[in-house]
Amino acid sequence: LIQEFNYRKFCLALGSVSAKVADDDDLFKDHESRNLSRDLGAAAATMLRVAVAVASAFGLRPSDWKDVNEACGKAVRSVPACYRLQRDLPGALNDARSLRFLPVPTTDAGIDLNPWRSEEGRALFAEAHSVEWKCIESLTEKDEKPSWGFTGVFEVVDVRHDEALSFVYLRAVRIGEPPGLFPTKDLQVGDPILWEVDRRLGDLLQPGFVVDAVWFELPSEVCFVSTLESVAPPWAP
């Protein structure tokens, strides 16, 4: 339901949208914003009802299917959130930092569309992320090039918010191969990092969520993600 679920095809099969709405990105995005949480929550609730039916049919004790019961119950909230995060992360702030400090190809038909270097790029970035470029400049005005790079799986420990940003505190679960470009940060399992994300995405992140990504750390010790591999609830494999 998180990694491979195609909500557009699901809605077409269900008949909750017409082919015209499904083919129009703006119309379907509006439908998704209003109905995704309800539909995925219903899917998780259905799994819970199936688990209850199986437990009842086989006379299982509550302790025999406790894990399944808890996972299905938590999925009602966590699956819709992870689905959105999987598709929307890294988000505007992290993308802007990647475009500023990493060798991201941005030339199209001879025109440089990097928002840090061209007006056309700033307009496209603002449209794609629904954010004013001047807000990005304000949030990143004190940024300096990254000190470290690393890859790995990190568990969300806490999320705190201000008006425009969320500050995500994570701990290392598994360290991967270094991405290069910058010196590799020496991390061990359990070590903490701090990640800044757009507030609308931070509102979806929950303690226990597991994020697998390529990370870079600024001299301020704030991290950004250049490439997201996956985001999952704690009970997912």
Image (tube, grey):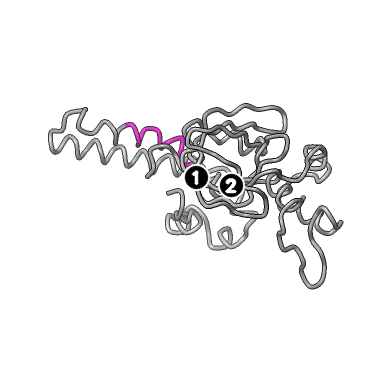
Q: How far apart in space, not on screen, are marks 1 and 2 (Cα)? A: 8 Å
Percent x, y for residue 143? 78, 40
* On screen, residue 9 above or below 219: below
CB within 8 Å, label 1 to label 2: yes
In the image, the segment drawn in magenta is 70-82
Residue 77 among magenta residues? yes
- Which quadrant holds the C terminus? top left
Which secondary structure dominates the residues rendered in magenta?
A: helix
Residue in the image at 51% along x and 39% along y: 154
Residue 30 among magenta residues? no
Residue in the image at 71% along x and 40% along y: 218
Q: Nearer the viewer, residue 234 or 171?
A: 171
User: Which type of secondary structure does the marked residue at label 2 adopt?
Assistant: strand
Q: Which residue position is annotated with label 2? A: 150
* On screen, residue 196 above or below 20: above
User: Which type of secondary structure does the marked residue at label 1 adopt?
Assistant: strand
Name the quadrant containing residue 42. top left
- The outermost residue toward the bottom is 109
Amino acid type of disc 1? Ile
Q: Is residue 70 left or right of residue 25?
A: left
Q: Which mark is residue 175?
A: 1
- The outermost residue toward the left is 59
Percent x, y for residue 182? 67, 50
Percent x, y for residue 137? 82, 42
Q: Is residue 177 left or right of residue 57?
A: right
